[in-house]
Amino acid sequence: AATAPGKKITARLKRTLPVRGPQAPTLSELMRWYCLNTNTHGCRRIVVSRGRLRRLLWIVLTLSAVGLILWQCAELLRNYYSASVSVTVQFQKLPFPAVTICNINPYKYSAMKEYLSELDKETKKALETFYGFSEGKSKVRRSVDDWNSTGSGFFEQIPLLKVEDFSRTATDLHSGQKRKIEGSVFHKDSSIVNSGDSNDIIGFQLCDANNSSECALYTFSSGVNAIQEWYKLHYMNIMAQIPLETKEKLSYSAEDLLLTCFFDGLSCDKRHFTRFHHPLHGNCYTFNSGESGTILSTSTGGSEYGLQVVLYIDEADYNPFLVTSTGAKIMVHDQNEYPFIEDIGTEIETAAATSIGMHFTQSRKLSKPYSDCTETGADIPVENLYNKSYSLQICLHSCFQKAMVDSCGCAQYAQPLPAGAEYCNYKKNPNWMYCYYRLHEKFVKEQLGCQQICKDACSFKEWALTTSIAQWPSIVSEDWMLRVLSWDKGQKLNKKLNKTDLANLMVFYKDLNERFISENPANTLVILLSNFGGQLGLWMSCSVVCVIEIVEVFFIDSLSIVTRHQWQRAKKWWSGRQRGRAPQAGDPERQGHDNPACIDEDLPTFTTALRLPLPQDSPLPRTPPPNYSTLRLETAFTEQLPDTLELGQH
């Protein structure tokens, strides 16, 4: 009977010993201490549960709860980096956008003849050779005498070829001789008009000027496309050598292009238009460009309160080989945006009234980490060559032009010049065509890296256009209207304008509803932390203090124990080396209170004294005589152990 109270006293003393968390000698004791003292109920139940089945059940439940927490927290993090889209529509006075207008024909053909005479002669010869075409009398009375032969020999370097039966031989247009085709063949098929013989293919061959064996044959199933592509190559080479001031004089002036102008019900003129020279479209004119510091606005929707202009197209002075359509190209854009009219311009017809209704939308996306967009383009390692606000198109064109200068030693004619570069031409850069086509092929296949570097802009303005077309002028009003316009143009009445030379354009807001589309974070930091707390409390009854406790035990204390063990091993190894022998693998390690590094700072109690190591070469202690005063336990354990009182009474 005396044994039972003694065991209870020993157990109570063990429970009242100082808690040894960070000072635990091993990881297993640290984990046991954590499970007994943590506020996370699942871990405690694993240790205190009786029976293997119940303990296994609590292990499964606890691990499942941890897995659910990790999954839910991952979902919360993913949702935190998502954005919601909000649309706001408001009615207000809207600024009118910039409207850029270009003639489809960039330069007056009558003024360009002296520069293009040799090229036109070679083109006409190709039509006669391949298709038996003989040019007759045209509207502007062009004759064979107009095609002079004051040209250079670069047509001999890149002539048009006629490849027969997909063989490796082709007929040279310039010399009429057959040549062997070397290098790779690139087919640019089209479903447009084919040559007379379906087996004949028209194309041209480009070779590396430094290595004649490096060649590429570009073929077209359509003779129209082949001749136009070949013509444009030589055309750009010629235009690259003409000074800008001369090209501006060869193109259309504001007086040539604009006949009448109205905006918001009031008359306007060329002073409201700003000229800029486009490499492919000649002189273009932008209405409401904002360069003067003033941006026009409108407070009323409808066609009567927008921009109305009548354009003089002058179809008879078009280049027959450069362009195959008649009319003008326009683009609606922001004042700080460069008009890529060759890419996204809208064509308008002649002898028709084109009405373009607009809806204004302003969009803004969130930048990192929500999306991969850029605010100003300053973080993009590509120089902006257009002197306008950043856009994806500006970045792509600038990137290609930079690669063109680096690879080919000159700049492509259709894009702005980088600093210190000059446009490509045969005289200074005989290899530029082959280099350009090879580089453009890589660009299309996304092998230059431009598509990977360039990003969308985070904010942009967009005008959604709705186009409608009506016949203009009407049959009953055609006669007097053309006479009046001819008089305004300064011509005699007996030489009135042709309606195919005119185009009527109206650009207006259909309504003044401004739509603003913006992205907002779907979750804030406060909501994220609240969701984390809800998941931890739901599955593990855990709080922030519990999380801090987990970090302290599983990372700081565990690392401290592992580091201490490694340090003790190193000390043993060093001590053994100093004594001339390495430590044996079988040497027992001291653990628990045998480890001098884990000395408890409290005074030894009855239980801890029993665990103290004995001194070496000392006799075993004998049982001391009983001290009967120690059996008086009423004052110390009356409340805790009432059964000891019964023992004392007996």
Image (cartoon, rainbow, N blue to C red):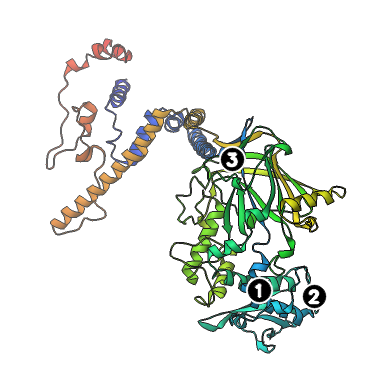
- Give the residue at the far top of this rendering: 649
Q: Which residue is mark 1?
A: 230
Residue 205 at what x, y percent from top left?
A: 63, 79
Q: Compare residues 617 and 39 and report the one nearer the observer.
A: 39
Q: Are marks 1 and 3 in contact (CB under 8 Å)?
A: no
Q: Which residue is mark 3?
A: 363
Which amino acid, mark 2?
Gly
Q: CA distance from mark 1 to mark 3?
A: 41 Å
Observer-side mark, 1 or 2, equals: 2
How dense is the environment of label 2, judged by Cα within 10 Å: few (below 14), some, or many (20 and up)?
Answer: few
Vertical placement of residue 606 versus 612, above or below? above
How dense is the environment of label 1, judged by Cα within 10 Å: few (below 14), some, or many (20 and up)?
Answer: some
Left or right, 115 with reference to 164: left
Vertical placement of residue 445 versus 148, above or below? above
Secondary element at tag 2: loop
Work out whether residue 157 can be spotted.
Answer: yes
Q: Compare residues 167 and 497 and report the one nearer the observer.
A: 497
Left or right, 68 with reference to 233: left
Q: Which residue is mark 2?
A: 136
* Residue 251: quarter of image: bottom right
Left or right, 358 with reference to 624: right
